[in-house]
């Protein structure tokens, strides 16, 4: 932890930079939702993907700086990488299921 006033000021500057980045990313999210047309109206896949990308960047900043994960042991990073891969694969499965739905045939179709 920070023991000297210089270290505390450095931490405060880091927090302020991350806070400013979060504000900019929030404005970017709002701008993308209002001004960028990535497809048909409604929740197009591209709109959702862009929103999730920006939200992931914001969540990473919060977790690394405000939750102090940037000073953790390497094991926590391995767990986080595994969790991220798992979540991304589940989202990919949802997109694959949406693009190629299963069709169930009744007995009369046989």
Image (cartoon, helix red, strand yellow):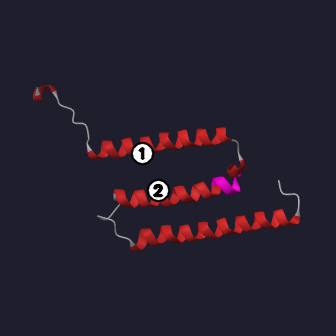
Look at the image and say whether residue 87 sits in the magenta stretch: no
Residue located at (38% from left, 44% from top): 92
Q: State whether residue 108 is above or below residue 70.
A: above
Q: State whether residue 38 is above or below residue 83.
A: below
**Would you say the residues marked 1 and 2 are in contact, meaning their CB atoms lie under 8 Å apart?**
yes
Q: Residues within 10 Å of mark 2 (few under 14, many from 20)?
A: few
Cα–Cα gap, marks 1 and 2? 11 Å
| Labelled disc at residue 70 | none
Under circle 1, the secondary element is helix
- Where does label 2 land, which residue? 52
Occupied quadrant, residue 80: top right
Residue 39 showing in the rendered view: yes
Most common secondary structure along the magenta stretch = helix
Q: Residues within 10 Å of mark 1 (few under 14, many from 20)?
A: few
- Where does label 1 land, which residue? 91
Question: Where residue 29 sits: x, y (%)?
Answer: 49, 67
Question: Where residue 2 sits: x, y (%)?
Answer: 84, 57
Q: Which of 48 and 6 is in front in this view?
A: 6
Residue located at (57% from left, 59% from top): 58
Residue 43 showing in the rendered view: no
Decide if residue 85 is on the left or right side of residue 19. Answer: left
Occupied quadrant, residue 45: bottom left
Q: Nearer the viewer, residue 7 or 58?
A: 7
Question: Where residue 14 sits: x, y (%)?
Answer: 71, 65
Residue located at (57% from left, 71% from top): 24
Sequence-wise, the earlier of marks 1 and 2 is: 2
In the picture, the quarter occupied by the C terminus is top left
Bounds of the magenta segment: 63-68
């Amino acid at each position: 932890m920070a023991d000297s006033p210089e270290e505390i000021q450095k931490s405060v500057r880091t927090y302020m930079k991350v806070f400013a980045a979060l504000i900019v990313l929030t404005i970017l999210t709002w701008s993308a939702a209002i001004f960028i047309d990535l497809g048909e109206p409604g929740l197009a896949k591209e709109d959702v993907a862009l929103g999730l990308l920006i939200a992931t960047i914001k969540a990473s900043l919060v977790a690394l700086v405000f939750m102090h994960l940037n000073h953790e042991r390497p094991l926590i990073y391995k767990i986080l990488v595994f969790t991220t891969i798992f979540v991304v694969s589940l989202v990919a499965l949802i997109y694959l299921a949406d693009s190629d739905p299963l069709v169930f045939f009744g007995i009369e179709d046989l």
